[in-house]
Image (spheres, grey):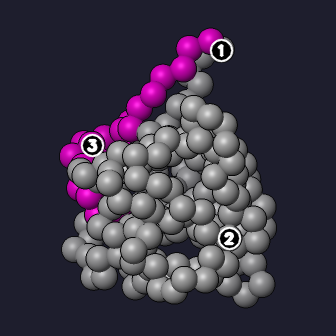
Amino acid sequence: MSGNVSWINEIKNNTDKAFVIWCWDTGNEGEYKDWITGKLVGRNDGGKRVTIAPRAHLRVTGCGVPDGGDRDGKSKCRVLCEASKVMDNNPMHDPGRGLRINRVQGPGEQDQILYYNHETVERIAAINFPRGKEQNLIMTIDEHGLKLTVHEERTSSDWKAYTFGQELGKFILSNLDEIGKLALEAAKAAGKLALL
């Protein structure tokens, strides 16, 4: 597995629906605070769910995308699910469905973020990017899809924002909107998805 980390540093929920974010990992589970007030919204420590309220804008710290290993015999992952669709009301349980993401080693000198339908464990997409750097991600949820935007240091003082996977050519560029739509469908617990 990759020794580098992709960090979610900001979450924008631009919808009128609440979402739950959950993580099963050995660390880097995440702490969420209101962007304006700094008030603590919640922590994913020990498998706790955190609710992302409608129209919330959150500042996030220590929130990594887990690698593909396991902890206590259960696969590590980060899951986003529409709050009304989680499988039970226990705030310490896996939501059982939604969009699952992991960061793993990809082919050659690349890493990947894998998108899965968490309920069916079917792969939605794999986004490749060069190995060797940590990514700083912004997660945006809106009516058109769920997108990760990367802030990557390109020179010592210049930061450039670009949509995750954008540099990888026409296939990814032509499918980013579709990946975002499929990711949002999975987060809304849509069951079976039409895969890319």
Task: Please name whichever residue, 166 or 82, is drawn nearer the observer in this view of the structure.
Answer: 82
Regarding mark 1 in the picture, which secondary structure is present there?
loop
Find disc 1 in the rendering and name its residue: 156
Closer to the N terminus: mark 1 or mark 2? 2
Position above or below: 171 against 186: above
Q: Residues within 10 Å of mark 1 (few under 14, many from 20)?
A: few
Find disc 3 in the rendering and name its residue: 173
Q: In x, y percent, where is residue 116?
A: 43, 71
Q: In x, y percent, where is residue 76?
A: 65, 73
Task: Please name whichever residue, 117 or 4, is drawn nearer the observer in this view of the structure.
Answer: 117
Quarter of the view holding residue 61: top right
Q: Tag count in the figure? A: 3
Position above or below: 161 against 25: above
Quarter of the view holding residue 118: bottom left
Which label belongs to residue 167? none
Q: In x, y percent, where is residue 134?
A: 65, 41
Q: Is 8 a magenta residue?
A: no
Q: Is residue 85 visible?
A: yes
Q: Is residue 148 left or right of residue 94?
A: left
Q: Is residue 75 visible?
A: no
Single out the residue that lies furthest toward the top: 157
Amino acid type assigned to the residue bearing label 2 in the image:
Lys
Q: Is residue 155 left or right of residue 29?
A: left
Q: Residues within 10 Å of mark 2 (few under 14, many from 20)?
A: many
Which label belongs to residue 48? 2
The kind of secondary structure the magenta stretch mainly shows is helix
What segment is highlighted magenta in the picture?
Answer: 157-183
Residue ID at (40%, 53%): 54
Q: Is residue 28 left or right of residue 119?
A: right
Closer to the N terminus: mark 3 or mark 1? 1
Amino acid type assigned to the residue bearing label 3 in the image:
Leu
